[in-house]
């Protein structure tokens, strides 16, 4: 089944403890992206990747890191999480970054709480 | 910078009636794509419809149509014959298809649609 998977789905952690949220897609998509969703703010893009080894900042990259070493995986790293990073996180992918035509396929979301 | 504005935090519609959800965008790029997504209470994001900046005709997908007014920079979603299952949060989004920050996707704040029986 074509899908985007994220792990973990739920995570409660403490301030300063490094964590990684994994994202994987099995559709051979070029484009991958991370978003956070907060009430009243919609979805905000954190980082995106047009292809392997190519990443760019979105609107809210502070406090996050990403890497794209292989096409299928795009992990999100929080080196030192803080309470203001408590949010619902979505990973998404789309077929190609060469045109705006392709819709994003979203993962199921990761609900992160930082205490 | 791209900006998407959805001015209606919440909308109500009677079942079987049509409803329009507003979306305005602010981009100076000639090439972009506009998307609408639905997020039911279960949380998943569902793609509904796409409109390219160079498309001459308004996009349609079943009961969904996009009223694209390029000069006014608006991309309103029209849902015809509303169903109870249409109750959800709806997001408008703009994909930057040229220039610096090529590939950046900006979402609006969302509109919660409630369909009454």
Image (cartoon, grey):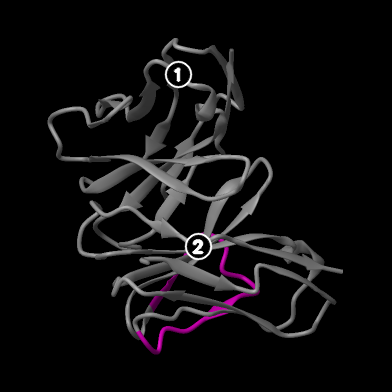
Is A98 one of the magenta-colored residues?
A: no
Q: Secondary structure at mark 2?
A: loop
Can residue B1 be seen in the rendering of this structure? yes
- In the rendered image, residue A113, in percent from the top left (x then y), is placed at 78, 65
Q: Is residue B22 left or right of residue B28?
A: right
Q: How many marks?
A: 2
Residue A31 position by quadrant = bottom left
Relative height, residue A85 to residue B55 (above, below): below
Residue that carries the numbered disc 1 in the rendered image: B82
Magenta region, residue range:
A55-70
Circles 1 and 2 in contact, beta carbons < 8 Å: no
Between B107 and B40, the one nearer to me in the picture: B40
Farthest front residue in view: A1
Residue B109 position by quadrant = top right
Between B102 and B9, the one nearer to me in the picture: B9
Distance from disc 1 to disc 2, alpha carbons, whole Å, reads 27 Å
- In the rendered image, residue A55, in percent from the top left (x then y), is placed at 40, 77
* Label 1, residues with CA under 10 Å away: few <14, some 14-19, many ≥20: many
What residue is drawn where x is 69% and y is 44%? Answer: A39
- In the rendered image, residue B24, in percent from the top left (x then y), is placed at 41, 31
- In the rendered image, residue A40, in percent from the top left (x then y), is placed at 66, 40
- Mark number, residue A107: 2
What residue is drawn where x is 40% and y is 58%? Answer: A105
What residue is drawn where x is 28% and y is 29%? Answer: B62
């Amino acid at each position: 089944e074509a899908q985007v998977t994220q792990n973990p789905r739920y995570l409660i952690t403490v301030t300063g403890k490094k964590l990684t949220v994994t994202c994987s897609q099995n559709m051979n998509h070029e484009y991958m992206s991370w978003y956070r969703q907060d009430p009243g703010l919609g979805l905000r893009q954190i980082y995106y990747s047009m292809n392997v080894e190519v990443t760019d900042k979105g609107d809210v990259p502070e406090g996050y890191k990403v890497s794209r070493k292989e096409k299928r995986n795009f992990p999100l790293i929080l080196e030192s999480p803080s309470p203001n990073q408590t949010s619902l996180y979505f990973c998404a992918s789309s077929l190609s970054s060469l045109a705006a035509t392709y819709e994003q396929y979203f993962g199921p979301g990761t609900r992160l709480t930082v205490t | 910078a791209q900006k998407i504005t959805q001015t209606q935090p919440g909308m109500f519609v009677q079942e079987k009636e049509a409803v329009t959800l507003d979306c305005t965008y602010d981009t100076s790029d000639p090439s972009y794509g506009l998307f609408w997504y639905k997020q039911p209470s279960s949380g998943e994001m569902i793609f509904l419809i796409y409109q390219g900046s160079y498309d001459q005709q308004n996009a349609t997908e079943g009961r969904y149509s996009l009223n694209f007014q390029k000069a006014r920079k608006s991309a309103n979603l029209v849902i015809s014959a509303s169903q109870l299952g249409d109750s959800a949060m709806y997001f408008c989004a703009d994909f930057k298809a040229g220039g610096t920050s090529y590939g950046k996707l900006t979402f609006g704040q969302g509109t919660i649609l409630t369909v009454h029986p």
